[in-house]
Image (spheres, rainbow, N blue to C red):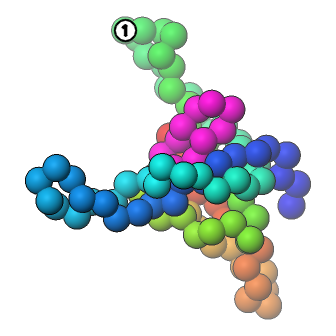
Amino acid sequence: MFLPHRVMLFLSTEQTDPDGNPIRRPDTEGVPSRAFMQPVAAHENLVDPQAARADYVVFLPASAPALDAFAAIEWEGRRFELVGQALAYKDPHGTLTHYQARLR
């Protein structure tokens, strides 16, 4: 798979909020990875046209760490959150080939 983009993966980690409750959020330290970022939708903001939002799909290599819904990805200075968990794709022999995740 052709992976032309360089991204930083921020894996989820369990932390404690100010009230002492356990929460999951992206770690502060990222892991570099190769990826293919593909825009899939754009949303226009009628109040502030400069604040339009785009949704992406990211393809990551099988060697990338598994991402859950609390992870984040940074690409070209923009930070994206995952919509759900990254999906693992396998070939007919059961070998993991790549991950795919929806971002916003």
Above or below residue 76? Residue 50 is: above
* Magenta run includes residue 58: no
* Residue 63 placement, left or right of 17: right
**Magenta residues?**
71-81
How many marks are shown on the rendered structure?
Answer: 1
Instruction: Answer yes or no: is residue 84 visible.
Output: no
Above or below residue 66? Residue 43 is: above
> Main SS type for the magenta part?
strand
Q: Residue 78, percent across and down?
A: 58, 32
Query: For the point 60% across and 41% down, which residue is it?
Result: 74
Q: Residue 19, percent across and down?
A: 11, 53
Quarter-wise, where is residue 33 in the image?
bottom right
Q: Which residue is mark 1?
A: 47
User: In which quadrant of the rendered image does the N terminus lie?
Assistant: bottom right
* Residue 21 placement, left or right of 46: left
Query: For the point 54% across and 37% down, which residue is it?
Result: 79
Could you say which is closer to the camera, residue 49 or residue 17? Answer: 17
SS of the residue under disc 1: loop
Instruction: Answer yes or no: is residue 73 visible.
Output: yes
Extreme-bottom residue of the structure: 93
Q: Residue flagged by tag 1: what amino acid is it?
A: Val
